[in-house]
Amino acid sequence: MSDQNRAPIYEALRQYASNRIVSFDVPGHKQGKGNGALLEAFGAKCLSMDLNSSKPLDNLTHPTSVIREAEQLAAQAFGAAHAFLMVGGTTAAVQAMIFHCCRPGDEIILPRNVHKSAINALILCGAIPVYINPGVHPRLGISLGMSVSDVRRAIAAHPKAKAVFVNNPTYYGVCSHLEEIVRLAHASGMRALVDEAHGTHLYFGEGLPLPAMRAGADMAAVSMHKTGGSLTQSSFLLTGPSVDGEAVRQIINLTQTTSGSYLLMASLDLARRELALSGRDTFRRVKRLCAYARAEINKIPGYLAFGSEILDGDRAYDFDATKLSVHTLDLGLAGIEVYDLLRDEYGIQIEFGDIGNILAILSVGDRELDIERLLGALSEILRRFQRDPMNMIQQEYIDPVVDMPPQKAFYAPKRKLPLEESAGCVSGEFVMAYPPGIPILAPGERITQEIIRYTRYAKQKGCVMTGPKDIELKFIEVVEMSLWSCGIPKSIVKTRDFPSG
């Protein structure tokens, strides 16, 4: 397989449409003929490709023709042994990696600032996390990568762990020393798994951090839709030569739909073709745009668009220069406040804002004019909304206290408590700001006054808090047996009318 000009799934869909097939299968809209509103909204060409699996179109769960060809082309483009088309997002790819390596009771070493999809995988398969706290940048308050020495200590303390899991890069563009962490994992007989949700472009650009497959990782979850140009919810799962590809496919088929969307698969096919043919030029231009934007933002008082100057050779080993991450606290504004102002006052939608930072995702679709509009808006926000930065929370990451495995806590009997009264108890649910979807609190972790204060502050600043049953987060579900550690006597626990979960 060497012809990266091919897009076999898309080509098969076009051929199918030209054959004027009469459809007596699903989907029921029959290429839009059965739903005028759908046709008007999405167009005839789009709906003509929203088809069901058939012999000419192959089958995602057991591909033998055009889908397999698309996988082989993707594997070649990314330098992997196998590439699997994922239509459940990178969430499904992350979970498939963990399911492949871990059984109930197995340990896995991973940074605590993982996406919730990784912790959800632990809940489902019963694996036990060995968390490594990432470094925290003293000036920016952001979480960094994993220290090599911390990984080495975790491996020595947990020699039976099945895998080491790495974020590469983080949401902010920070990379750990991936190649050395992979080497340490392999030297101890462990798999090296990489969440590359924000790293598709690393495979195709120049002067960017080392991607997982080139670092020798065993598996990598690549969010093609984020920076690779495919449709939302489409991703790749990449594996190295030492991984049994067909065994991985069986794991994927446990949870991935049997009705794979051909729109998503064709978008992966076309996006891969575009990256393979033009990715180098594309990301050279994106890097240039980012460098210009970073330099201009740093001329505006109160903002810090950070980059490679934060590198320390360890927890911040490398930096993705296509990330436009901006620290805002010197303005007296939380990142989420700047995020809201950009959208509501200036019509600019960026990727996310958190307590201290904003992130703008730049791609080939952005123009110099768009950058100028962003720069103008940031200048106006300084002029109109700057405040005294006193009493701003500085640090994004809070070290967790893990009292029980996530699966045990998630399925344990639980009671609902007011959040303000829950300190000392063990959480039975997630609490996180989304995006980025990194839990502030996960099942099995102890609720502390620091977490309560941080959560209250994040809500006040406008962060969208997700995870708990109570959408207003006035209440939180705690593990019932942990109520006594909240200072509530056993006799009261037995008689007090706690609302049931």
Image (cartoon, rainbow, N blue to C red):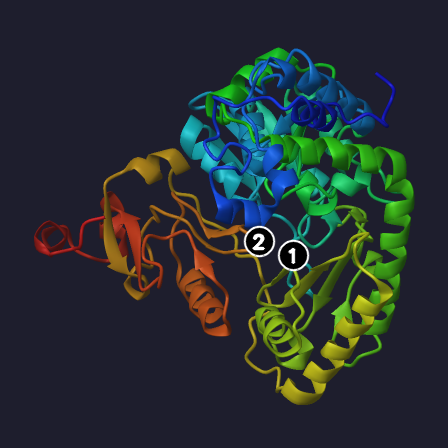
Question: Label 2: how many residues lie within 10 Å, few (<14), some (14-19) or many (20+)?
Answer: some
Q: Nearer the viewer, residue 428 or 321?
A: 321
Q: Dot 1: what SS?
A: loop
108 lies above or below 429: above
Q: Nearer the viewer, residue 147 or 362?
A: 362
Q: Amino acid at mark 1?
A: Val
The tag on residue 436 is 2
Labels 2, 1: front one: 2
Q: Dot 2: what SS?
A: loop
Q: Amino acid at mark 2?
A: Pro
Horizontal relation, residue 364 to residue 360: left or right:
right
From the top left corner, tell me how far across and down residue 397 is, in percent.
56, 57
**Residue 486 visible, this orientation:** yes
Q: Earlier in the sequence, mark 2 or mark 1?
A: 1
Q: In whole angstroms, how far apart are the C-alphas of marks 2 and 1?
A: 17 Å
Q: Which residue is mark 1?
A: 136
- Tell me where residue 182 sits by quadrant: top right
From the top left corner, tell me how far across and down residue 132 is, in percent.
58, 42
Judged from this view, the residue extending furthest toward the left is 495
Horizontal relation, residue 94 to residue 454: left or right:
right
Question: Label 1: how many residues lie within 10 Å, few (<14), some (14-19) or many (20+)?
Answer: some
From the top left corner, tell me how far across and down residue 475 is, in percent.
29, 60
All told, the count of numbered labels is: 2
Residue drawn 72% across the image and 84% down it: 380
217 lies above or below 442: above
From the top left corner, tell me how far across and down residue 257 is, in percent.
49, 27
**Residue 152 visible, this orientation:** no
- Quadrant showing the N terminus: top right
